Amino acid sequence: MLTGFAVNYCNFTSICLAQSTSGMTVFEARGPCKPKPYCIAAYLAAVEPGTYMHCTYNGDALLSDTTFPEMDHPLGAPDGPATEKTPGDGVWTRRFASGTVAVWNENTQTGTVTWGSV
């Protein structure tokens, strides 16, 4: 089942909420389909199995307009769900087997990804 409401895939809390109400969640990336770095951070911090980001672009340059360098970084399995360093501070961190670290700050609605390697 897909989520039945609009969800901002650039927001950690929205992604978590959508996942909690559906067995399968698809986020539609509109426009150029190249997410901003903070969107990738929110998505990686929250994503669970059965959650996908889908591009709705349909143009002549589909492949070149819907790929981005971050797609080539290996992640490996997450070490677990995102956690708050200090409970209640709104800063969520998630680590992956490759050494990649995604950080999402709910208070400022910003995030970063530090890419690791296998």
Image (cartoon, helix red, strand yellow):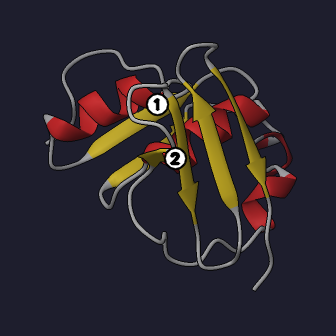
Residue placed under numbered mark 1 in the picture? 12
* Nearest the eye: 92 or 63: 92
Q: Residue at x 77, y 35 (%)?
A: 37
Q: Is residue 30 left or right of residue 81?
A: right
Residue placed under numbered mark 2 in the picture? 45
**Location of residue 104 (image quadrant):** top right
Q: Quadrant of the N terminus?
A: top left
**Location of residue 115 (image quadrant):** bottom right
Q: Is residue 49 left or right of residue 58?
A: left
Q: Residue at x 76, y 27 (%)?
A: 32
How far from the left and from the top, in percent, is residue 44? 55, 49
Q: In this orientation, does residue 16 appear?
A: yes
Distance from disc 1 to disc 2, alpha carbons, whole Å, reads 7 Å
Q: Quadrant of the C terminus?
A: bottom right
SS of the residue under disc 2? helix
Contact check, label 1 and label 2, Cβ < 8 Å: yes
Residue neighbourhood size for the residue with mark 1, other residues' Cα within 10 Å, grouped as few (<14), some (14–19), many (≥20): many
Q: Is residue 8 left or right of residue 110?
A: left
How far from the left and from the top, in percent, is residue 26? 37, 40
* The furthest residue to the bottom: 118
Q: Is residue 88 above or below residue 48?
A: above
Q: In this orientation, does residue 59 appear?
A: no
Residue type marked 2: Ala
Residue type marked 1: Phe
SS of the residue under disc 1? helix
